[in-house]
Image: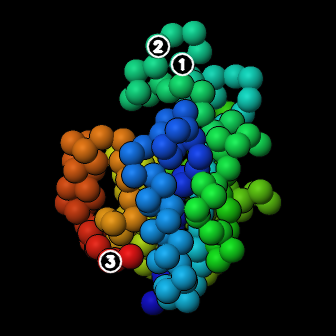
Amino acid sequence: MSRALFIIDVQNDFTEGGALGVDGGTAVAQAITRYLADHAGEYKVIFASRDWHDAGNDNGGHFAADAEPDFVTTWPVHCVAGTNGAAYHSDLKTDKVTYHIRKGQGVPAYSIFEGHTEAGSSVHNLLDEHGVDVIDVAGIATDYCVRASALDALSHGQRVRVLTDLVAGVAPRSSEAALAELAHAGAELVDTGA
């Protein structure tokens, strides 16, 4: 059995004070760093994803250009490639990350499986290459990109654990619904105590 860890979108724009800041985002960055200090050796590979949107366009309708965002399919401008908002939160230590994944380049993208490394490798191919069959998922936001990434991992045949104390969501109700959906789909919900 080979395990991977997905760290989803722990970026400045998704933590407090960012363009789409989530309450608890900074705490998640800190908790993931503590978790990695004790558990990184349990993983064959560690992936960290970032939204990495193109500047100067609406990224396939993802950015609400001149209209009010609906916060479901259209959003304020966020995580533009190369900006501070797209950078990992400073409390997330990434020295143990094996692969950095960029997603949402010119198009909406929620799941880590929609991204690729800077060299162009897909997450699916890298998981196959490393024989991964179990994936732990942490990061932001529970009700959007964490949910989408965990569902895609399940659909690709991996066993999935969502590390519930290492995630933060946009809203309590939608986050609870996402966790319930993931559990129903076969994910295990685990509190790491980090």
For the residue marked with disc 3, what is the amino acid?
A: Gly
**Three-letter amino acid code at the position of disc 1:** Ala
Which of these two is toward me, 4 or 84? 84
- Mark 3 or 2, which is nearer the eye? 3
Numbered circles on residues, count: 3
Of the residues under marks 3 and 1, which one precedes in the sequence?
1
Q: Position of residue 144 (x, y in %)?
A: 40, 45
- Few, some or many residues within 10 Å of mark 3 (<14, 14–19, 20+): few
Give the x, y percent position of residue 147. 37, 52
- Mark 3 sits on what residue? 193
Q: Residue visible at 40% across and 21% down? A: 70
Position of the N terminus, as image quadrant, is: bottom left
Mark 2 and mark 1 residues within 8 Å of each other at the beta carbon = yes
Residue 17 point in image, percent of width and height: 52, 38
The residue where tag 1 is placed is 64
Discs 3, 2 touching: Cβ within 8 Å: no
Between the residue at mark 3 and the residue at mark 2, the CA separation in whole angstroms equals 39 Å
Residue drawn at x 68%, y 62% is 100
Q: Is residue 20 above or below residue 99?
A: above
Q: Is residue 56 above or below residue 94?
A: above
Question: In terms of image quadrants, where is residue 95?
Answer: bottom right
Under tag 3, what secondary structure?
A: loop
Residue closest to the far top: 66
Left or right relative to 88: residue 21: left
In space, the residues marked 2 and 1 are separated at their CA atoms by 6 Å
Question: Label 1's element?
Answer: loop
Q: Earlier in the sequence, mark 3 or mark 2?
A: 2
User: In what element is the residue under mark 2?
Assistant: loop
Q: Out of 151 and 25, give the one closest to the viewer.
A: 25
